[in-house]
Amino acid sequence: MEKVMSHPVDVHVGKKLKNLRVLRGQTQTDVAKGLDISFQQVQKYELGRNRISASKLFELSNILNVAPSYFFDGLNQSADGSSPVIDEETARIAAVFSKIKDERLKSQIRSFIDAVAGYAPTPEETPVS
């Protein structure tokens, strides 16, 4: 039996779904319940193995609180076929960071990350404390 390759758009949409789901702190089961499907189906969507219908994509955008176009953002940004989608670890860190309420602490964490990465923000990028 011949293996059918996933379409690059389906893979891209799946990566966007997974990263956003992780960023929102939701499990595959949480998303599956909202769509009235199995978590295995969500896995297939995230891997690009199954194409997401327009109606499911619309439901997903409501569940995850984004515009449907979000899932297609970045499709034409790289000529080499690589996706600008953030990796799972970065999404997890962003999700945890967004839960920090103390703005001063958040500013200190940003400064620490900038220092470790050797990044010097411009005055316009520096948050006002």
Image: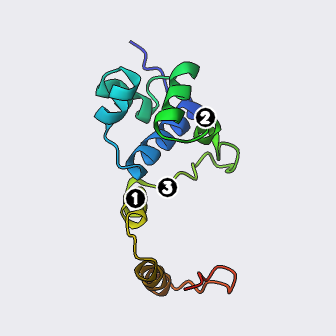
Q: Nearer the viewer, residue 16 or 8?
A: 16
Residue occupying image coordinates x 42% and y 56%: 91
Real-space Cα separation, disc 3 to disc 1, in angstroms: 12 Å
Please state which amino acid type lies under the numbered disc 3: Ile
The circle on residue 68 is 2
In what element is the residue under mark 1?
Answer: helix
Task: Say whether residue 63 is left or right of residue 33.
Answer: right
Does the CB distance between marks 3 and 1 fall below 8 Å? no
Real-space Cα separation, disc 2 to disc 3, in angstroms: 18 Å
Mark 1, other Cα within 10 Å: few <14 / some 14–19 / many ≥20: some
Please state which amino acid type lies under the numbered disc 1: Ala
Mark closest to the chain's N terminus, 3 or 1: 3
The circle on residue 95 is 1
Q: Is residue 112 visible?
A: yes
Q: Nearer the viewer, residue 1 or 34?
A: 34
Please state which amino acid type lies under the numbered disc 2: Pro
Relative image position of residue 118 (x, y in whole percent): 52, 86
Mark closest to the chain's N terminus, 2 or 3: 2
Colour scheme of this structure image? Answer: rainbow
Determine the image quadrant of residue 68.
Answer: top right
In the displayed structure, would residue 111 be above or below residue 49? below
Mark 2, other Cα within 10 Å: few <14 / some 14–19 / many ≥20: some
In what element is the residue under mark 3?
Answer: loop
In what element is the residue under mark 2?
Answer: helix
Task: Say whether residue 29 is left or right of residue 4.
Answer: left
Relative image position of residue 50 (x, y in whole percent): 45, 23
Q: Which residue is tagged 3?
A: 86
Relative image position of residue 93 (x, y in whole percent): 38, 63
Residue occupying image coordinates x 35% and y 49%: 25
In the orientation shown, which residue stands out farthest toward the top? 1
Relative image position of residue 48 (x, y in whole percent): 46, 31
